[in-house]
Image (spheres, rainbow, N blue to C red):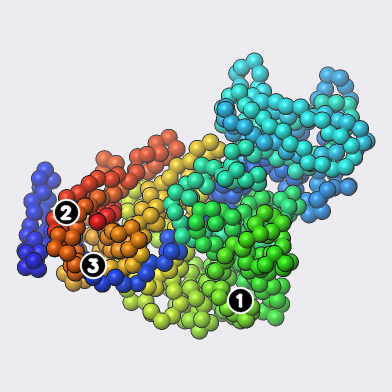
């Protein structure tokens, strides 16, 4: 057999039509040598509120500035008639502003306000929308408001697509709700509120959600977007970032304690993605924290992913703030360390503990099963290890089972990286987060990146990566193919790589600051990119253990003479199958033989199928868009097997997942 296969691999195959000659490749898989387990956390998700991923995205709230807390209190609102912004007697101390609608002074005049939403308020005919508001009447009687969903651009007789009346009674603040059922689908609508009685009314926390949220949660998530996450079957959910954790200055940093408890009383925070790129500037981008740590933990649980929160280490964003005094002095870190300890209690603590009780009061008495905690995002220099050390010490003492993720800085190599890896080893971090947004050549050259990593040190978390095409910085097929190729190296090294998350995850088509991203959306629809399908193919075919796979006795890493192939193999001992992933990054089809050595039976392979991802009409720069969401989708076909061998041809520029039973 060996001789035959060598003959095959040396044999030149003339390819019909193309007139190209390419030799065959034989991949040998040692079925009898299952190696490292593939961690359940291996393929996961990175979530950050960038590109309107949270407010205006996954978080299904449709009202922007619902608590009137933006620096300009009425940003996002048009007010008309007699509207004041007040704070006296506000119901929520951390969100102290509310509006008072009073009589406009004439029978023919109106008082009210309407909200523009995030790039519009979008609603669909046939769906229900839950409006809610905290309200009171300052004089203590009864006041009426009319709530409408409108299409301001309608050419019809009316702009009003849904309406309902609400009576507000008495001086005490109360929550009122009603349901709106639009008569038409509108992408760029508005929520409009009229005062409909002479008596004034005070309004606070004006909210509008689709009734049909993910899993039906009231403070819920957009169903189509959450479903896309669930469909990946991720093993990990990292949140809430990203640089958003750090803050340009300390008060802007992400503080998880501000994101839990009653949603009405979570204070607003800046979002650095408002101003990071002046060429894509979004003055109305803030964090409402409606999607907070409780919701992240719940989402992780509901999509079957291990939660991986990341916390501020006492450093502000080192890109944005060069002032050494902007960071927390090392001897003043205690409150930050306490936040980390309290987070573990919030996630896992008994309901008799302070933070465990809060979790229970929010609806989840059972622990969330937190096992991993990242401390620091993209940090560098000695400032980082000197701050991380006391966190690790305290965490080990209080919660020795929690695995700590440290950072290797913002780049895939270089001084910062070379300094931090040994530091992470010294501090005995359990995992080290690596980030690489890199061009095509980098991905092509990194197939063997982890082959020689230290097996005794911390494990790797490839925490942010994406192929950023040179001058072609969008979600084209070629980027996804190269990510797939690179990921074979993660998988082959599953003994050292325990987690990997593509980044960023979401982008609103009208509100993005950073691309490429995995899922794009507008207010009504969403689209999975080619990169999404790569992630999904890996996560749903991760197997249980790595199998040795070689070509000419060498790992297949896109090296010289390997036909531009990258490959990895796993066995799935639960599903009872072998899975071989091969990316052909070359311009020519490659005749391919998968040979399984060490199988016990004589004709052991009974069936095979392949799932491929390839460029439509060979267009490597093709992408999936909202208008054409299915240009690049996985396609499945059956294949013939013979004995312990599968012979096939892998088309040029194609990622293939072979599943053999
Ligand atoms: O993913 C976008 C940003 O890239 C993240 O916030 C940061 O960690 C990295 O620089």
Q: Residue at x 29, y 70 (%)?
A: 34
The label number, if any, that marks residue 201 in the structure image: none
Query: Left or right of 35: which side holds 329?
Result: right
Query: How many residues crowd around disc 1 within 10 Å: few (fewer than 14), some, or many (20 or more)?
Result: some
Whether residue 352 is situated above or below residue 170 in the rendered picture: below
| Residue position for label 1 | 399
| Residue position for label 3 | 31
Label 2: state its secondary structure: loop
Residue 440 seen by the camera: no
Whether residue 234 is situated above or below residue 417 in the rendered picture: above
- Residue 267 falls in which quadrant of the image? bottom right
Picture coordinates of residue 327 (x, y %)? 66, 72
Q: CA distance from mark 3 to mark 2?
A: 15 Å
Quadrant where the image shows the N terminus:
bottom left
| Residue position for label 2 | 641
Residue lying at the far right in this picture: please name it. 139
Whether the residue carrying mark 3 lies under 8 Å from ligand 1 is answered with no
Picture coordinates of residue 621 (x, y %)? 33, 46
Quadrant where the image shows the C terminus:
bottom left
- Residue 628 falls in which quadrant of the image? top left
Residue 159 seen by the camera: yes
């Amino acid at each position: 057999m060996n001789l035959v296969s060598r003959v095959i691999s040396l044999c030149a195959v003339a390819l019909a039509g193309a007139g190209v000659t390419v030799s065959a490749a034989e991949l040998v898989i040692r079925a009898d040598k299952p190696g490292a387990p593939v961690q359940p956390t291996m393929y996961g998700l990175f979530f950050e509120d960038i590109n309107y991923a949270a407010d205006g995205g996954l978080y299904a709230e449709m009202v922007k500035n619902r608590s009137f807390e933006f620096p300009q209190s009425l940003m996002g609102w048009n007010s008309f008639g007699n509207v004041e912004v007040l704070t006296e007697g506000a119901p929520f101390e951390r969100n102290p502003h509310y509006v008072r609608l009073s009589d406009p002074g004439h029978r023919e005049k109106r008082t009210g306000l309407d909200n523009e939403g995030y790039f519009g308020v979008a609603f669909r005919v046939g769906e229900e929308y839950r409006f809610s508001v905290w309200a009171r009447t300052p004089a203590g009687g009864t006041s009426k408001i009319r709530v409408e969903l409108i299409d301001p651009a309608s050419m019809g007789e009316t702009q009003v697509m849904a309406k309902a009346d609400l009576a507000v009674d008495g001086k005490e603040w109360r929550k009122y709700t009603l349901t709106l059922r639009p008569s038409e689908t509108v992408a760029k609508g508005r929520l409009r509120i009229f005062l409909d009685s002479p008596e004034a009314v005070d309004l606070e926390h004006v909210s509008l959600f689709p009734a049909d949220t993910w899993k039906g949660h009231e403070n819920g998530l957009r169903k189509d977007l959450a479903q896309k996450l669930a469909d990946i079957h991720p093993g990990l959910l990292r949140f809430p970032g990203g640089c958003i954790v750090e803050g340009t200055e300390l008060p802007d940093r992400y503080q998880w304690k501000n994101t839990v408890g009653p949603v009405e009383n979570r204070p607003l925070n800046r979002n650095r993605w408002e101003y990071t790129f002046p060429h894509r500037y979004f003055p109305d981008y803030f964090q409402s924290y409606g999607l907070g740590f409780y919701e992240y933990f719940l989402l992780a649980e509901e999509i079957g992913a291990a939660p991986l929160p990341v916390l501020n280490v006492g450093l502000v964003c080192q890109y944005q703030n060069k002032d050494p005094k902007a960071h927390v002095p090392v001897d003043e870190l205690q409150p930050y360390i306490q936040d980390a300890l309290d987070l573990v209690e919030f996630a896992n603590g008994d309901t008799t503990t302070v933070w465990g009780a809060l979790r229970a009061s929010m609806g989840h008495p059972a622990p969330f099963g937190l096992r991993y905690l990242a401390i620091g995002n993209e940090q560098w220099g000695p400032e980082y290890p000197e701050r991380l050390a006391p966190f690790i010490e305290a965490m080990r003492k209080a919660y020795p089972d929690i695995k700590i993720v440290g950072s290797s800085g913002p780049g895939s190599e270089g001084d910062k990286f070379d300094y931090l890896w040994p530091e992470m080893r010294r501090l005995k971090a359990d995992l080290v987060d690596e980030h690489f947004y890199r061009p095509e050549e980098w991905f092509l050259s990194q197939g063997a990146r982890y082959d020689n990593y230290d097996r005794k040190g911390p494990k790797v978390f490839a925490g942010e990566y994406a192929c950023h095409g040179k001058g072609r910085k969008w979600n084209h097929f070629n980027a996804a193919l190269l990510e797939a190729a690179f990921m074979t190296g993660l998988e082959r090294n599953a003994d050292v790589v325990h987690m990997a998350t593509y980044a960023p995850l979401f982008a609103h088509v009208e509100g993005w600051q950073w691309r490429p991203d995995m899922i794009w959306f507008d207010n009504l629809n969403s689209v999975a990119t080619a990169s999404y399908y790569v992630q999904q193919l890996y996560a749903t075919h991760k197997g249980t253990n790595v199998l040795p796979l070689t070509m000419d006795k060498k790992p297949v890493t896109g090296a010289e003479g390997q036909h531009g192939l990258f490959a990895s193999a796993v066995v799935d001992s639960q599903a009872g199958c072998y899975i071989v992933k091969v990316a052909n990054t070359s311009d020519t089809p490659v005749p391919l033989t998968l040979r399984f050595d060490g199988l016990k039976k004589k004709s052991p392979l009974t069936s095979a199928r392949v799932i491929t991802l390839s460029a439509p009409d060979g267009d490597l720069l093709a992408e999936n868009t909202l208008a054409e969401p299915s240009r690049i989708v996985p396609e499945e076909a059956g294949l013939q097997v013979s004995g312990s061998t599968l012979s096939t041809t892998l088309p040029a520029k194609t990622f293939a997942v072979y599943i053999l039973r």
